[in-house]
Amino acid sequence: MKPKLSKPEAQAKIEEFFKKDTFTPKQLKKIKRLAMKFKIKLKSYRKKFCKSCLSQLKGKARITKTHKSIICQICGYKNKFRLA
């Protein structure tokens, strides 16, 4: 039987995961599900991966007055983030 995590332990596990430089979509899917289970918002970590294919976000970037959009190199999905 797996040991049960508490919300602070899950938060620490998520933070430690995003400290790594590289990750696979499969690993990211597990972390994202862990965050959803404990209702933890990914906030700034969301900008590190593609919303569609869950790979590391690399590609063309465009910046307007209100938004920054990055087109994923792998799947071609347009990830759009509001500038604060």
Image: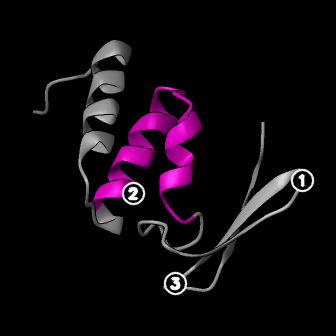
In the image, is residue 29 part of the stretch drawn in magenta? yes
**Label 2 is placed on what type of residue?**
Lys
Q: Is residue 57 left or right of residue 43?
A: left
What residue would you read off at disc 1? 65
For marks 1 and 3, the one nearer the N-term is 1
What residue would you read off at disc 3? 73
- Please determine whether, in this image, residue 50 is positioned above or below residue 4: below
- Please determine whether, in this image, residue 73 is positioned above or below residue 78: below
Say what secondary structure mark 1 lies in.
Answer: loop
**Magenta region, residue range:** 27-50
Identify which residue, 22 or 6, lies in the foreground: 22
For marks 2 and 1, the one nearer the N-term is 2
**Viewport quadrant of the N terminus:** top left
For marks 2 and 3, the one nearer the N-term is 2
Residue shown at 32% from the left, 25% from the top: 10
The Cα–Cα distance between marks 2 and 3, rounded to whole angstroms, is 19 Å
What residue would you read off at disc 2? 29
Q: Position of residue 38 (x, y in %)?
A: 46, 26
The Cα–Cα distance between marks 2 and 1, rounded to whole angstroms, is 32 Å
